[in-house]
Image (cartoon, rainbow, N blue to C red):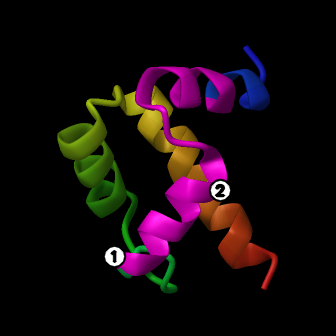
């Protein structure tokens, strides 16, 4: 499964687009350097019922955003 397929499945499951997850994560302070993946995955699993693999795809999306700055 490609990374894009993961993101597409997450959007189908949650109704939340990847760019919206970025906005939500920023509002929670999860895009700050040094944020641990566990904090993000715990949030995604609790609020959006994402499994670990899908939650980690969002973590990667956020970390890639951080690295591109």
Q: Residue furthest front?
A: 15
Q: Residue furthest left?
A: 46
The residue pinned by badge 2 equals 19
Q: Marks 1/2: CA distance?
A: 15 Å
Q: Residue furthest top?
A: 1
The residue pinned by badge 1 equals 28
- Seen at 56% across and 31% down, the residue is 11
Horizontal side, residue 32 vs residue 3: left or right = left
Q: Is residue 11 above or below residue 37?
A: above
Q: Is residue 61 above or below residue 3?
A: below
- Seen at 48% across and 32% down, the residue is 15
Residue 20: percent from the left, percent from the top? 56, 56
Magenta-drawn segment: 7-28
The N terminus is located in which quarter? Answer: top right
- Seen at 47% across and 77% down, the residue is 26
Name which quarter of the figure residue 62 lies in.
bottom right
């Amino acid at each position: 499964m490609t990374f894009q397929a993961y993101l597409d499945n997450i959007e189908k499951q949650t109704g939340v687009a990847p760019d919206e997850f970025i906005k939500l994560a920023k509002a929670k302070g999860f895009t700050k350097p040094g944020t641990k993946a566990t904090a993000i995955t715990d949030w995604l699993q609790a609020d959006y019922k994402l499994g670990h693999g899908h939650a980690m795809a969002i973590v990667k999306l956020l970390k890639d955003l951080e690295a591109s700055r």
